[in-house]
Amino acid sequence: MPASTEQPRSIEPKLADDHVSEFEEVEEELSREITENPDAFQRVLDRPEIQNIVVSHEAFQGPLPHPNILRGYQEILPDAADRIFKLTEKEFEHRHRMEDKALTGAIDRDKRGQHYGLAAAIITVFFAFILGLFGHDVLAGSIIAIVVALVAIFVLRHKPKDNPQQPQAKSTSHSDIEKDQDS
């Protein structure tokens, strides 16, 4: 008989499978014990060596540190919590001042643009009037029509109503016409 060239199977996968099933058995047994004896589980968790193993995650979000962290700062430096609160209050005040400045600046810029636009429209209409006096009626009329159209666009501009739920083409009822006249 010829010698077999097959090598003996490794026993490692079998050991790994045995280890996994043993772990699952222990896990099942622990779960059962914990549900049957929750007080014993709490006593085990209170042990320092177990607390070093157990990992917990606590999320906190806000302008101030978590109260536990704040207490830790307070232990290190007695007036730390007060300092942190004052610093946070100053930051809020600063942020609000900057937002007010930005808003005031934007409003002033818009007003300035409106004043410049009004001045440009008045000057253009004046020169169109002069052109009309010198016999250039068609040119003067065209310039005035363009200026009136531009002023109407800027003064009477309406923001489009964005309502994605309404279909584009719809029939107009009497109540829709009354709503449009009210706005």
Image (cartoon, rainbow, N blue to C red):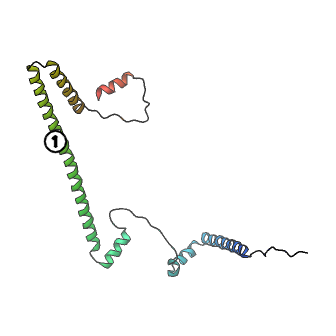
Q: Position of residue 29 (x, y in %)?
A: 66, 72
Between 101 and 130, which is closer to the camera in this rendering?
130
Amino acid of disc 1: Arg
Vertically, is 130 above or below 117? above
Image coordinates for residue 165, horizontal then vertical, percent: 44, 35
Residue at image mark 1: 112
Residue at x 26% of width, y 32% of height: 157
Left or right of 121 in this view: 73: right
Give the number of callouts.
Answer: 1
- In the image, what residue occupies the spot 48% across and 70% down? 56
Which quadrant holds the C terminus? top left
The image quadrant of residue 122 is top left
Residue under the image location 17 percent in, 37 percent down: 114
Q: Is residue 62 above or below residue 157?
A: below
Q: Report the residue at 22% width, 32% height from top.
A: 155
SS at circle 1: helix
The quarter of the rendered structure image containing the N terminus is bottom right
